[in-house]
Image (cartoon, rainbow, N blue to C red):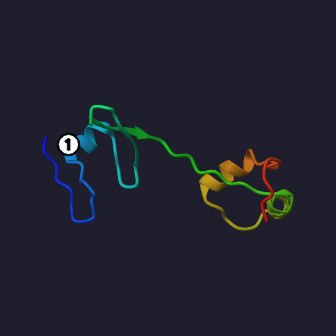
Amino acid sequence: MLVALDRYGSITLPGPVREKLGLEKESYLELSLEADGIILLHPVAVQRTVRLNEKGLNKLEEARKSGTGELPEWLTGEMEDAEADTDQQIS
Protein backbone atom coordinates (compact mmCIF):
# COMPACT_ATOMS: atom_id res chain seq x y z
CA MET A 1 0.00 0.00 0.00
CA LEU A 2 1.48 3.31 -1.06
CA VAL A 3 1.14 6.39 1.17
CA ALA A 4 2.67 9.82 0.66
CA LEU A 5 4.16 12.39 3.01
CA ASP A 6 2.32 15.72 3.00
CA ARG A 7 4.16 19.03 3.06
CA TYR A 8 4.48 18.80 6.86
CA GLY A 9 6.02 15.31 6.75
CA SER A 10 2.84 13.62 7.98
CA ILE A 11 1.22 10.52 6.55
CA THR A 12 -2.43 9.55 6.54
CA LEU A 13 -3.23 5.94 7.30
CA PRO A 14 -5.87 4.68 4.87
CA GLY A 15 -9.34 4.09 6.32
CA PRO A 16 -9.26 0.28 5.94
CA VAL A 17 -6.00 0.14 7.93
CA ARG A 18 -7.41 2.35 10.71
CA GLU A 19 -10.58 0.26 10.83
CA LYS A 20 -8.70 -3.06 10.95
CA LEU A 21 -6.55 -1.80 13.84
CA GLY A 22 -9.45 -0.09 15.63
CA LEU A 23 -7.76 3.31 15.43
CA GLU A 24 -9.83 6.44 15.94
CA LYS A 25 -9.10 10.15 16.18
CA GLU A 26 -6.38 10.88 18.71
CA SER A 27 -5.13 7.27 18.76
CA TYR A 28 -1.43 6.84 19.47
CA LEU A 29 1.15 4.82 17.57
CA GLU A 30 4.67 3.88 18.69
CA LEU A 31 7.14 4.31 15.83
CA SER A 32 10.39 2.38 15.65
CA LEU A 33 13.02 2.31 12.94
CA GLU A 34 14.70 -1.01 12.26
CA ALA A 35 18.35 -1.24 11.22
CA ASP A 36 17.39 -2.17 7.66
CA GLY A 37 15.24 0.98 7.22
CA ILE A 38 11.90 -0.65 8.00
CA ILE A 39 9.49 1.63 9.86
CA LEU A 40 7.25 -0.14 12.36
CA LEU A 41 4.10 1.40 13.84
CA HIS A 42 2.41 -0.22 16.83
CA PRO A 43 -0.88 1.02 18.31
CA VAL A 44 -0.48 1.90 21.99
CA ALA A 45 -2.84 2.99 24.74
CA VAL A 46 -1.85 6.20 26.52
CA GLN A 47 -3.17 6.60 30.05
CA ARG A 48 -3.56 10.03 31.55
CA THR A 49 -1.66 10.66 34.76
CA VAL A 50 -2.48 13.24 37.38
CA ARG A 51 0.32 14.05 39.82
CA LEU A 52 -0.30 16.11 42.93
CA ASN A 53 1.87 17.24 45.82
CA GLU A 54 0.60 17.19 49.43
CA LYS A 55 -1.05 20.60 49.04
CA GLY A 56 -2.87 19.43 45.91
CA LEU A 57 -3.94 16.20 47.61
CA ASN A 58 -5.34 18.18 50.53
CA LYS A 59 -7.37 20.34 48.15
CA LEU A 60 -8.56 17.22 46.38
CA GLU A 61 -9.68 15.65 49.66
CA GLU A 62 -11.49 18.87 50.57
CA ALA A 63 -13.27 18.80 47.20
CA ARG A 64 -14.22 15.13 47.69
CA LYS A 65 -15.82 15.94 51.04
CA SER A 66 -17.73 18.96 49.68
CA GLY A 67 -19.74 16.76 47.31
CA THR A 68 -20.32 19.67 44.92
CA GLY A 69 -19.53 19.94 41.22
CA GLU A 70 -19.17 17.40 38.43
CA LEU A 71 -15.75 16.18 37.38
CA PRO A 72 -14.87 14.26 34.21
CA GLU A 73 -15.06 10.48 34.62
CA TRP A 74 -11.36 10.01 33.81
CA LEU A 75 -10.42 12.41 36.64
CA THR A 76 -12.68 10.80 39.23
CA GLY A 77 -11.05 7.46 38.40
CA GLU A 78 -7.62 8.98 38.94
CA MET A 79 -8.75 10.58 42.20
CA GLU A 80 -9.66 7.21 43.68
CA ASP A 81 -6.01 6.14 43.48
CA ALA A 82 -4.36 9.50 44.22
CA GLU A 83 -1.43 9.54 46.59
CA ALA A 84 1.53 11.79 47.31
CA ASP A 85 4.36 11.82 44.79
CA THR A 86 7.40 11.59 47.03
CA ASP A 87 9.87 11.32 44.13
CA GLN A 88 9.47 14.90 42.91
CA GLN A 89 8.64 18.28 44.35
CA ILE A 90 5.72 19.78 42.43
CA SER A 91 4.81 23.37 43.09
What is the quadrant of the N terminus in the image?
top left
Determine crowd level at label 1: few under 14, some 14-19, many 20+ residues with C-alpha closer than 10 A.
few
* Residue 52: quarter of image: bottom right
* Residue 9: quarter of image: bottom left
Find residue 68 and report its horizontal and vertical position in percent.
76, 67
Element marked by disc 1:
helix
Where is 10 relative to 23, above or below? below
Q: Is residue 70 left or right of residue 47?
A: right
Q: Is residue 11 left or right of residue 86?
A: left
Judge by depth and name the residue closer to the eye, 89 or 68.
89
Judge by depth and name the residue closer to the eye, 54 or 2.
2
Find residue 39 and report its horizontal and vertical position in percent.
29, 39
For the point 33% across and 41% down, the residue is 22
For the point 74% across and 47% down, the residue is 80
Where is mark 1, residue-wise?
16
The amino acid beneath tag 1 is Pro
Where is 71 relative to 38, above or below? below
Q: Residue furthest front?
A: 35
Judge by depth and name the residue closer to the eye, 70 or 83.
83
Find residue 16 and report its horizontal and vertical position in percent.
20, 42
For the point 59% across and 51% down, the residue is 48
